[in-house]
Amino acid sequence: MDLNMGKYAFFVWGSYGVTALALLSLTVLSVRAHRERARKLRALQETLAAEKAQKVDA
Amino acid sequence: MIISWLANPERFSKVFAPVRPWVAGLSLVLFVWGLYLCFVSPEDYQQGDTVRIMYIHVPAAWMALFTYLVMGVASFFGLIFRHALADAAAKAAAPIGAVFTALALITGSLWGKPMWGTWWEWDGRMTSVLVLFLFYIGYIALHASIEDEQRAARSTAILALIGLINLPIIKFSVDWWNTLHQGASVLRPGGPTVAPAMLWPLLMMALAYKALFVWLWLIRIDTEILSRKYNGLRARLGFREGGA
């Protein structure tokens, strides 16, 4: 495997760099948004469940 | 039958939650293998090492078209059958498609400069791919600008369906007009004209991109389902508080 791209290094590594950056950013943003949404939904469901339990107790 | 069974958002989430890590793993393996092949494959006798840009540029362009097709089909089902999941599927695909299209344009430009002597040319292929990118951006912007979910789904579905006209234009632009781009060399009648030593890394990277798309798409659809559930619960809570 020869990683020396000679006079085309800027174009080859530039392409791979931009691709890696874009795909990694998309992945991180997608996973983070999913976790955040799941956490918020869980918190809301717990609040509602606690409210319901309080009403039953009362 | 299976599609209508899976159209239930809750069921969709339950069925695909255990599948997602496997698709992520598959994508990672394919990327490692594909990237290895990209750099052990020989350089082209004319293009030199710039041929390695093909292994990431062509799959990005294929995925730009494929993702839009997915978005169009989902929009069609959303518009005709009013499946809640169909709009979520179309909306989830749009940012992924926009990124693939941007990558096709950028890596194409980085390949074009050393080979054609220009970063950009207003030829049929490049212009129609730029139009595809604008359709993705327009879809995302339109969805974000309409608050009512159902109205947003309907408007964006119509936009997505109009944009489908652009797909055959992109595919056949190299045959219809004079262009710097070469004609089809992989998906063509009579089989690929690319040498096997270069075809394998290309196909491996195409599979890696496809697996990554499936994984991200499933995650984003689930995020959309969770968002709608969250908004629904909040709306019910707001209604109860307002009515009290």
Image: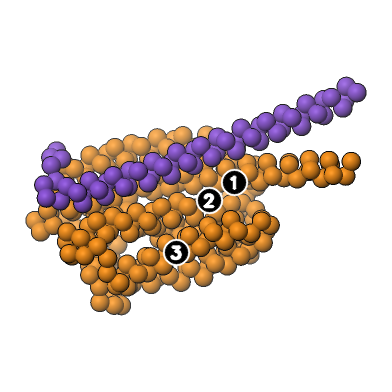
**Extreme residue in the left direction:** B45
Front tag of 2 and 3: 3
Chain hosting mark 2: B
Q: Residue at x 77, y 29 (%)?
A: A49
Circle 3 sits on which residue? Answer: B134
Tell me: B188 left or right of B11.
left
The image shows residue B223 at horizontal and vertical percentages of: 57, 42
Disc 2 crowd rating (10 Å Cα; few below 14, some 14-19, many 20+) is: many
The quadrant holding residue B37 is top left
Q: Residue at x 20, y 60 (%)?
A: B113
Which chain identifier belongs to the orange chain? B
Q: State the CA–CA distance, disc 1 to disc 2.
A: 7 Å
Which chain identifier belongs to the purple chain? A
**Extreme residue in the top direction:** A57
The image shows residue B164 at horizontal and vertical percentages of: 47, 68
Compare residues B20 and B228 and report the one nearer the observer: B228
Compare residues B142 and A46 and report the one nearer the observer: B142
Q: State the CA–CA distance, disc 2 to disc 3.
A: 17 Å
The image shows residue A3 at horizontal and vertical percentages of: 15, 40
Q: State the CA–CA distance, disc 3 to disc 1.
A: 23 Å
- The amino acid type found where label 2 is placed reads Ala
Chain hosting mark 1: B
Chain hosting mark 3: B
Q: Earlier in the sequence, mark 2 or mark 3?
A: 2
- The amino acid type found where label 1 is placed reads Glu
Q: Which element carries disc 3, helix, strand or loop?
A: helix
Picture quarter with the C terminus of chain B: top right
The image shows residue B228 at horizontal and vertical percentages of: 66, 46
Disc 1 crowd rating (10 Å Cα; few below 14, some 14-19, many 20+) is: many
Circle 1 sits on which residue? Answer: B224
Tell me, for residue B92, which label it has, or none.
Answer: 2
